[in-house]
Image (cartoon, rainbow, N blue to C red):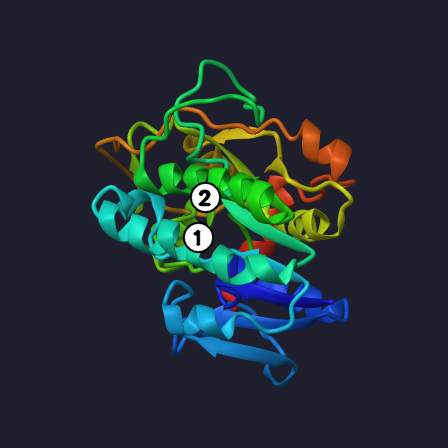
Amino acid sequence: MRALITGGFGFIGSHLTRHLLDKGWGVTVVDLEGAAPCVALPMEKLTVINGPYYAPEVIAQCSGEIDVCFHLASSVGPALSNEKIVFDIETNLIGTVSLLDALSPKQIRRFVYISSGGTVYGTVPSVPISEDQHGFPTCSYGIVKKAVEYYLHLYSKIYGMRYNVIRLANPYGVGQRLNYNQGAIANFIGKIINNVPLEIWGDGSVIRDYIYIDDVVRAIVAAAESDAENEIFNVGSGVGLSLNQIVKILRDDFQLPFEVKYQASRNVDVPVNILDITKALAKLNWRPEVDVKSGIEATLTWARGQ
């Protein structure tokens, strides 16, 4: 099998690339010039296309022989997307549709799109959130992700594009950037190691669904290999934890000393997001295996060695 992975040197992409190589896949990675993988990879086994995935000259290079496209790359994250709405649309919406245009004549086996279970639903009346619940995203990032899902459905009708969508919860784990503002667990661990106070937006009651990177990768690969197609799957732990609970785990279970500073809440943060993963359990023959304490322990051990 041959894979094209956009964002293949990012946190999720690096782990996915390594996993596919271990399974004997041929892998082509698309990522920015100068980007380095988040985990060690046998670079001699990879084909690398340098540049933003949405650039026409890069898309033109993506039309080689591939079986599965894993589309992970994004030019902007949720927190900043409302400040860069036009850029978000031009790169992540139009760019993704341009990629679909390039790949649709090839009748690839599967297009696996990494959407966002944390942003496409917005504020909903009840949790856990199933795939058929509809809300209004509170950020451009979520709106664009949802729009791409609609275009995938359209391309399946027009061109027979076979796809699966992963609406991903909050991934964390070994290799995640510790100095980045996306990813609470890695962000907290990085600040604790560097003796910097933790910053929490709001009162810490915001609840999220955290899923360890190994479980994420297994779900993504299952979406490529499963007989299920043209489906949307929530992928998370199915368990909600508040930021204050994460803080308590870090203090009580790992005996870590640190200070917490609470800041004003952000408009992009919905109060609760917990995903109903029943559909993925049933159709992907997948289930999360790493509990949050084990995942934090693995991430902390890795981070201390950096």
Task: Give the distance between the C-alpha atoms of the residues marked 1 and 2, in whole angstroms.
Answer: 7 Å
Along the horizontal axis of the image, is 276 left or right of 95?
right
Question: Toward the viewer: 248 or 163?
Answer: 163
The x, y position of residue 163, in whole percent, is: 62, 47
Question: Toward the viewer: 28 or 61?
Answer: 61
The x, y position of residue 2, in whole percent, is: 69, 69
Q: Which residue is mark 2?
A: 148
Regarding residue 29, the answer to whether it shows in the image is yes
Q: Nearer the viewer, mark 1 or mark 2?
A: 1
Along the horizontal axis of the image, is 293 left or right of 198?
right
**Residues at circles 1 and 2 in contact by the CB criterion of under 8 Å:** yes
Question: Toward the viewer: 230 or 129?
Answer: 230
Q: Amino acid at mark 1?
A: Val
- Residue in view at x 48 percent, y 42 percent: 151
**Quarter holding residue 91:** bottom left
Task: Return the mark for residue 97.
Answer: 1
- Residue in view at x 58 percent, y 24 percent: 130
